[in-house]
Amino acid sequence: MRVKILTDSQEEFEAKRPELLKRIGGDEYEIVSKALKTLPRAPKFQVKKEMLEYWSGRFKETTNAIKKDIEDVLNEET
């Protein structure tokens, strides 16, 4: 989608930006200040949450295995 916006100044554009975004995005989107985004959002879809939990678990398993291997190598040399 292309949108052409004609304004007299950058300040005018900045002042009307929230209204413009609401009109383009409709009711599905909301404008939130970055300062208010302190906590991570919950996933919109349950599948996304399950995928994140799965890969997070795999990452932890892999890093723990690597740590164990490193400890074994260090203990062999001493």
Image (tube, grey):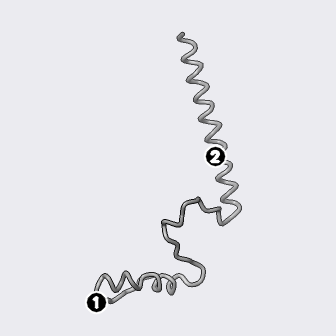
> Three-letter amino acid code at disc 1?
Asp
Location of the C terminus (image quadrant):
top right
**Is 54 rendered above or below residue 47?**
above
> Quick check: 43 above or below 2?
above
Q: Earlier in the sequence, mark 2 or mark 1?
A: 1
Residue 74 in the image, given as x and y percentages of width and height: 54, 17
The local secondary structure at tag 1 comes to: loop
Q: In the rendering, which numbered label is found on residue 22?
A: none
Q: Which mark is residue 56?
A: 2
**At 63% across and 39% down in the image, what residue appears?**
60
60 or 40: nearer the eye? 40
Which quadrant would the N terminus be assigned to in this image?
Answer: bottom left
| Nearer the observer, 47 or 71 | 71
Say if 10 sits above or below 55 in the image: below
| Mark 2 burial class by Cα count in 10 Å: few <14, some 14-19, many 20+ | few
Q: Nearer the viewer, mark 2 or mark 1?
A: 1
Check disc 2 and give the amino acid type: Ser
Q: Which mark is drawn over residue 8? A: 1
Q: Residue at x 56, y 77 (%)?
A: 30
Q: Residue furthest front?
A: 35
Image x and y of residue 38, in percent: 55, 60
| Residue drawn at the location 61% of the way across and 41% of the way down | 59
Query: What SS does tag 2 mark?
Result: helix
Image coordinates of residue 41 in percent, x first then y, are 61, 62
* Residue at the (57%, 77%) spot, across then down: 29
Q: Residue 22 in the image: state x and y as whole percent.
A: 51, 83
